[in-house]
Image (spheres, rainbow, N blue to C red):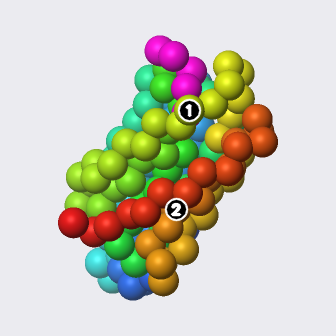
Amino acid sequence: PAHMEQVETAPSNMHIVLYGNNSQGQNLSLFDVASKKTLKVKWHVSGARYVDFTPSVQVTKDFILMGYEDSETKHNHVLLFDFEGKLLADIALQTEEGAYLYSHSFAEEKAYLYIATDDSTLSAFKISKD
């Protein structure tokens, strides 16, 4: 029920992830691909406000990574969800005032999350499934 800007398929091809950013806030939805004819919303999360810069979403075999701007402080985070909708991690980014999350990428082989912001910062985080 929201404007969507990005569509990603899970590597298992059993889920479709939709992300959007509109006047109602940021939206992330996971759909089960039950059959070739129907899609069922498995879960949906939504932020409290529109964000100025729309971050991307990445889907890996184990996680859904979503860039997120906190509505109170306007600081950026990367949120990690599992395919059941459980929030596994909330990585707060230490950025200069007014800086945005620019890009993130997860290297599955080594389980490193790389995050770049527009204040010329590159950060690396080791992510584990535990």
Q: Is residue 130 visible?
A: yes
State how many labels appear.
2
- What residue sits right under mark 2 in the picture? 113
- What residue sits right under mark 1 in the picture? 94
Q: Of 39 and 103, which appears nearest the observer?
A: 103
Q: Position of residue 59 (x, y in %)?
A: 48, 67
User: Which residue is rendered at x = 65% and y = 41% of the image?
Assistant: 101
Mark 1 surroundings within 10 Å by alpha-carbon count, few (fewer than 14), some (14 through 19), many (20 or more): few
Which kind of residue does numbered mark 2 sit on? Leu
Q: Quick check: is 48 in the magenta stretch? A: no
- Magenta segment boundaries in residue numbering: 72-76
**In the image, residue 53 above or below residue 17:** above
Mark 2 surroundings within 10 Å by alpha-carbon count, few (fewer than 14), some (14 through 19), many (20 or more): some
Q: Main secondary structure of the magenta part?
A: loop
**In the image, residue 3 above or below residue 30:** above
User: Which residue is rendered at x = 55% and y = 57% of the image?
Assistant: 124
Q: Of 8 and 127, which appears nearest the observer?
A: 127
User: Which residue is rendered at x = 47% and y = 78% of the image?
Assistant: 110
Q: Earlier in the sequence, mark 1 or mark 2?
A: 1
Q: Report helix, strand or loop for mark 2.
A: strand
Instruction: Tell whether 11 sits left or right of 87.
Output: right
Q: Quadrant of residue 114?
A: bottom right
Q: Position of residue 67 (x, y in %)?
A: 54, 45
Q: Report helix, strand or loop for mark 1.
A: loop
What is the CA distance from the residue labelled 1 to the residue labelled 2? 15 Å
**On-image quarter of the N terminus:** top left
